[in-house]
Amino acid sequence: MTADPSPAIRVAVAHFPSIVAAVPDARASTVRTLTAWSVDADTVDLAELVACELASNAVKTSRPDDGVALRLTVCDAVLTVEMWDASTVPPVLTVAHPDQESGRGLMLVDAVSLRWAWYPGRTAGKVVWAQLPAATTPAVRACRRGPPHGQAIFNCSSPKSTMTLRVPPSAAT
């Protein structure tokens, strides 16, 4: 009898200052990380858009001394993009007037994601998240047949912020 390999969970976290320059940095970090994980190009493009919009909102609602944080998680063909900021003001999906120059970010996130929402941060602030379907190339699927379940594999360019965890088959059901 051949059992399916346990699912791989990939997680990356990046911290940025709460300044406008954090938005392109979050975009670049998203693209770099997902490309290294062999996530398909269409998902990378959508994730770049979502990360940009969430980072933009996070920077706008934060004070200059606050930081913002981005977490990317791929598990079971779903990519979750999360953005933490220090503000407790919940995000609001609004319909922007055609003449407005801003106010369309969450509409875009809502349009391209499977679902999105927010939750209060553990110690402060809030986390806004969105999920996207995440197809991967054979390179990622092949890595699932790697080490025995229960082992952590540190990979990609930054072992401190990117890891792949193996989930025991009993925990995956």
Image (spheres, rainbow, N blue to C red):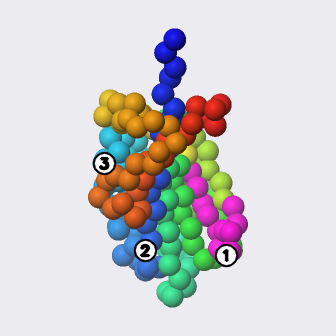
Residue 156 shown left or right of residue 46 in the figure: left
Name the residue tied to disc 2.
16
Labels 2 and 1: the sequence-earlier one: 2
Q: Secondary structure at mark 3?
A: helix
Q: Secondary structure at mark 2?
A: strand
Amino acid type, callout 1 = Ala
Q: Position of residue 15 (x, y in %)?
A: 45, 71
Name the residue tied to disc 1.
124
Q: How many residues crowd around disc 2 within 10 Å: few (fewer than 14), some, or many (20 or more)? A: some
Name the residue tied to disc 3.
36
Q: CA distance from mark 2 to mark 3?
A: 20 Å
Establish if 5 lies above or below 152.
above
Q: CA distance from mark 2 to mark 1?
A: 17 Å
Question: In this view of the protein, can residue 16 be seen by the observer?
Answer: yes
Q: CA distance from mark 3 to mark 1?
A: 31 Å
Q: How many residues crowd around disc 3 within 10 Å: few (fewer than 14), some, or many (20 or more)? A: some
Q: Position of residue 173 (x, y in %)?
A: 65, 31
Image: magenta residue range: 119-130
Q: Is residue 120 magenta?
A: yes
**Nearer the observer, disc 2 or disc 3?**
3
Q: Nearer the viewer, residue 152 or 66?
A: 152
Residue 44 shown left or right of residue 111 in the figure: left
Q: Nearer the viewer, residue 114 or 134?
A: 134
Pointers 2 and 1 in contact (C-beta within 8 Å): no
